[in-house]
Image: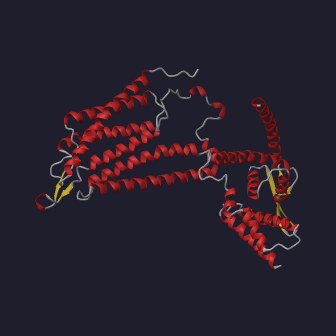
Amino acid sequence: MSKQTEAEELHRGIVTELRRGLSVVLVLARLGREQYGYTLLKELDAAGLAVDQNTLYPLLRRLESQGLLSSTWKVEEQRPRRYYARTSLGTTVLKGLRAELAAERTLLEEIEHETR
Amino acid sequence: MRHAEDITDLFARYAAEVGRHLPWRGRDDIEREIAATLADRLDDRMAGSGREATAEDAAALLKETGHPRKAAVSYLADTHLVGPALYPMFLLVCRVALPVLAAVLIGVLTLSAALGADPSTGFFEHLVRILGSAAGGVLQAFALIVIVFAVMERVDARKASAAGLPADGAWDPRTLPRVQPGSKIKISDQVAAIVGNTIVLAAVVLLPRFAVRNPSIAGRAVVVAILSEGFLRLLPVVMGVAIAQIVAAVFLLTRRSHTAATIAVSTAVKVLSIAAAGIYLTVYPYVLAGPGLPAGAELGIEVVNKVIRAGCVLGIVFGSVEVATLLVRYFRRPVSVA
């Protein structure tokens, strides 16, 4: 494996890790109002965070099992759809995550400033 | 209409195939959600095309989504047989229990072979049988440990991993054991000592009973002893040293770093081994006996005897250095953590 390929693979892995954490915040933020998985998928895509179906749905289930989301089945256009919404626990956790992200943004700016 | 049925069937088959790899709980929900999302995605894709979706369009979408097993894996990312919370405890149990069990099994099987087996069966045949049975026993024990930890993982991993630990605010960091440079006890060394000495023990217990058949003597099969007479007299010493080394290694396995007790035990066992090697070299330095063995075996036996003698000399030199190191470590003051 060439150094360039190795660097690209490492880069991809780290970006995936970073996005995994970020997608939790974005999903919690978007689910202040109830919506089903596919509309959320499209919203995240439009916001610039392209998440595929196989990443989003397991994440929704994990957040639900942790009590941060709740879900209900509804039938629309003769199609069953699972609607997700943030719980009060989810709102509390999101508030903490936002504060954490703001602190990290400041830290990143400081690092950027120092290494410039 | 036919297209719509084909597509619904294809999506249902895909969702069912994903579900086949998932745990029973929640599987139906996941399958329904996957099938509904695929239908939504296909509708969106066809909206701008001005034509009805076909089974080929559905198949193309599924190919893009990925193989069902790959999709199932993403649902299982946080599923562990033994998760991170219990893994350190699992590793510790395996590292201590399995080598000890291996040594005990080899010891017991060797003794039962030495006491009750047929001497005409080959020594190596017995050795292979003993090692095979011991390996089977260790594998069974490993499977049992995995099952116990997997059950703990599913009951309440966090609670089980915290068992025996004091509450967060109730432990005193100053009670942590003192650490000196180079004082960590290597688990691999102890495992090697247990396995190596058990094999030595097995060999010296079995070899006097299992002899070599030499058909060349006077045209008939004659059984001749393979261990020399002189070495047979030293056998109790050799066995004593091997047992002492196994016991010491088991004791050291239960400790993470050296203390006065571990240094004392290690030094005593090393001194005992050096003394035994010294006695062997000065009294009768021939493990294997040559006369009476098949033609051509004498040279091989002489080589083995020389290799064992060289091993003893090296053992005395390196053992002495190790004893000196242990004593220096014992008398050196502990590093202050303040």
Instruction: Residue A16 in the image: state x and y as whole percent.
Output: 72, 48
Left or right, B318 with reference to B209: right
Instruction: Identify the residue shown where x is 35% and y is 54%.
Output: B130
Residue at 83%, 55% in the rendered image: A40
Residue that appears at 44% across and 52% down: B138
Question: Residue A6's spot in the image, x, y percent?
Answer: 64, 47
Asked which colour scheme the image uses, the reply is secondary structure
Which quadrant holds the N terminus of chain B?
bottom right
Query: Is B78 placed above or below B165 here?
Result: below
Whether residue B255 is situated above or below residue B331 in the rendered picture: below
Q: Point out the residue furthest to the left here.
A: B218
Tell me residue B207's x, y (percent).
25, 50
Position of B227 compared to B111: left or right? left
Q: Is residue B244 visible?
A: yes
- Total number of numbered discs in the rendering: 0
Name the residue nearer the viewer: B171 or B24: B24
Residue ID at (36%, 38%)? B245
Question: Which x, y percent locates residue A25?
Answer: 80, 46
Asked whether B303 or B160 is in front, the reply is B303
Quadrant of residue B214 within the rendered picture: bottom left
Q: Quadrant of the C terminus of chain B?
A: top right
Q: In this view of the protein, can residue B273 be seen by the observer?
A: no
